[in-house]
Image: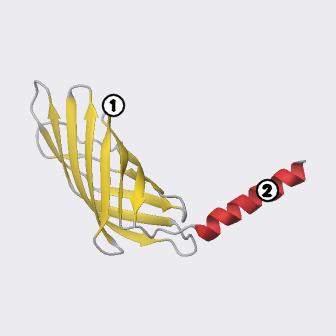
Amino acid sequence: MKKLLVVFGLALLGTVTVKSQTSYKAALGLGVDAVNSATFIGATGKYFFTSNHVGQADLGFEDGATMITILYSYHKRFVGAGGLRWYAGAGPSIMLVDNMDNAFALRPHLGLDFKVNGVPFVANFDWRPAIVLSDGDNEVGAFGFGLQFAFN
């Protein structure tokens, strides 16, 4: 039984590895932006202007606050890892908070993007610190996660 499970696991891993690729033009879905002990959840969208140049927009909501983030990313494939790409870039964020001043930040980011061929979903995870340009504290421990439906 143990050998059967190992064979099944290797076959499944081989299928995912062989069929993986990142050929999609745009993606829409759910995004999570965790920054400064707050977790913003909402819509995220990504569009490939070329195979390497990507624009992304996030609209996240938290109790009494809304965050709008626009990011530019340079995407590049890992050699030998079909569906996996790394990306890096930057963009602005504005946080609109009820009964408080709005906060503006620059958000550099570095992350991973993964899509499996035949599955219309994309997953991505990135580190995106907040360099606050208005009143407020910078946040180094900020992360983003997205699960999106991919369009060709």
Under tag 1, what secondary structure?
Answer: loop
Please determine whether, in this image, residue 29 is positioned above or below residue 97. below
Instruction: Please name the residue shown 36% across and 75% down the image.
Output: 51
**Which residue carries the number 2 mark?**
8
Q: Depth check: give the residue in front, 17 or 121.
A: 121
The quadrant of the rendering that contains the C terminus is bottom left
Instruction: Please name the residue shown 46% across and 66% down the image.
Output: 85
Q: How is the image coloured?
A: secondary structure
Instruction: Please name the residue shown 32% across and 56% down the image.
Output: 109
- Three-letter amino acid code at disc 1? Ser
Under tag 2, what secondary structure?
Answer: helix
C-alpha gap between disc 2 and disc 1: 41 Å
Please determine whether, in this image, residue 95 is positioned above or below residue 47. above
Label 2 CA crowd tier, 10 Å (few <14, some 14–19, many 20+): few
- Three-letter amino acid code at disc 2? Phe
In the rendered view, does 33 fall on the left or right side of 19? left
On residue 37, which mark appears?
Answer: 1
On residue 67, which mark appears?
Answer: none
Please determine whether, in this image, residue 79 is positioned above or below residue 9. below
Please tell me whether mark 2 or mark 1 is closer to you in this view: 2
Which sits earlier in the primary sequence, circle 2 or circle 1?
Answer: 2
Q: Locate residue 147, reporting x and y percent.
A: 43, 49
Q: Depth check: give the residue in front, 118 or 23.
A: 118
Q: Locate residue 26, reporting x and y percent.
A: 34, 62
Q: Locate residue 45, reporting x and y percent.
A: 30, 54
